[in-house]
Image: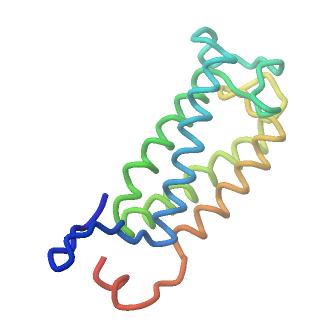
């Protein structure tokens, strides 16, 4: 997106806030992860526990891939404004906080492990919670941030 300067006739890029940039980066990463996950899993075994199905060491199955895609697209869409990007941060905190607790219970076990979660996933979920907190709580600076 860009703003057109009527005085000079030039176009300048809109300034994005740090939360918007974080939401874009995380959203893009999750979207790509979800798509790449289907290259590993295909579309069979939607809730199967298959410890040999990993993407860069992280457990995946089709359901797990869909979660990544949904959170990724949400990040891309919610990066449009500072306030919605901060809301996305809170979505990551709550969603991945719950995923971390769930993973601590089921990681590496067949029973109840509907998303094929492993220890590496748990570590990544903890990082996602921290990233969500950074996105949601990044300090606001200047008058521009107060208007968003």
**What coloring was used for the rendering?**
rainbow
Above or below — where is 14 with respect to 118? below
Residue 18 place in picture, x, y as percent: 51, 71
In the image, 129 versus 140, the foreground residue is: 140
Which residue shows up at 58% across the image and 35% down it? 32
Left or right: residue 67 compared with residue 76: right
Count every numbered label the image shows and give the total: 0
In the image, 52 versus 13, the foreground residue is: 13
Residue 53 place in picture, x, y as percent: 77, 19
Which residue shows up at 60% across the image and 68% down it? 133
Residue 9 place in picture, x, y as percent: 19, 70
Above or below — where is 65 with respect to 87? above
In the image, 86 versus 49, the foreground residue is: 86
Which residue shows up at 53% across the image and 45% down it? 28
Q: Which image quadrant: the C terminus?
A: bottom left
Q: Which image quadrant: the N terminus?
A: bottom left
Above or below — where is 108 with respect to 126? above
Q: What is the quadrant of residue 118 in the picture?
A: top right
Left or right: residue 148 compared with residue 122: left
Which residue shows up at 62% across the image and 34% down it? 33
* Residue at the limit of the structure toward the top, as seen here: 44
Residue 108 place in picture, x, y as percent: 84, 30
Left or right: residue 114 compared with residue 55: left
């Amino acid at each position: 997106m860009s703003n057109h300067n009527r005085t000079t006739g030039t176009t300048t890029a809109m300034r994005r806030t740090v939360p918007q940039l974080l939401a874009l980066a995380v959203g893009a990463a999750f979207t790509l992860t979800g798509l790449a996950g289907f290259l590993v899993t295909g579309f069979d075994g939607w809730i199967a526990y298959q410890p040999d199905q990993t993407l860069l060491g992280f457990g995946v199955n089709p359901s797990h891939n869909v979660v990544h895609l949904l959170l990724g697209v949400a990040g891309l869409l919610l990066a449009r404004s500072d306030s919605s990007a901060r809301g996305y941060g809170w979505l990551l905190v709550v969603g991945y906080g719950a995923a971390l607790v769930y993973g601590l219970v089921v990681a590496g076990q067949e029973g109840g492990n509907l998303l094929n979660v492993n220890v590496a996933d748990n570590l990544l979920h903890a990082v996602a919670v921290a990233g969500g907190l950074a996105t949601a709580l990044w300090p606001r600076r200047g008058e521009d941030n107060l208007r968003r």
